[in-house]
Image (cartoon, grey):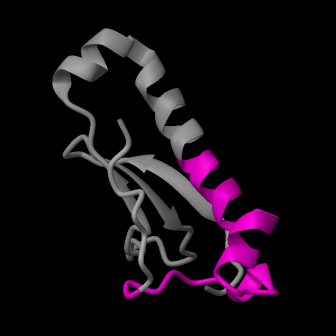
Amino acid sequence: MNESYLEIVELDNGEIVLRPVTLDDDKEAEPLVVLKLSKTTKSYLKDNYFELAKHMFGAGIDYIYSDQTTREHGFEDADTFEFDDELEDPDRIVH
């Protein structure tokens, strides 16, 4: 992924997305990640649900650029790190 600034935005449909910032006001960038919280969760968290989203996205970015992740997947340069859908990831469900 090219170097760019990212923004976290709550869309009109209630989804919270992480996406690249665009310089063209008429065009929205495709979201990199979409987070959809239930109405129950939003109600429980009140105004803190957006803070939760920021921390979740931040943790994901920290993980991607961590030394351990890049070593495990054989990437020496974190700037060129991209997930491959074919990689085995047994940790898809956490209990």
Residue positioned 26% across, 13% down in the render? 43
91 and 56: which one is in front? 91
Q: Is residue 60 above or below residue 30?
A: above
9 and 83: which one is in front? 83
51 and 81: which one is in front? 81
Measured as percent of width and height from the top left, residue 64 is found at: 65, 66
Q: Is residue 38 left or right of residue 49?
A: left
Locate the C terminus and report the quarter of the image it occupies: top left
Q: Is residue 64 above or below residue 27?
A: above
Measured as percent of width and height from the top left, residue 77 is found at: 81, 86
Q: Is residue 64 above or below residue 80?
A: above
Residue 79, magenta (yes or no): yes
- Count how many numbered circles sit on residues in the image: 0
Residue positioned 54% across, 49% down in the render? 57
Residue positioned 75% across, 83% down in the render? 79
Residue positioned 73% across, 86% down in the render? 75
Q: Residue furthest front?
A: 90
Measured as percent of width and height from the top left, residue 32 is found at: 44, 69
Q: Is residue 43 above or below residue 39?
A: above
Q: Which residues are magenta?
A: 57-86
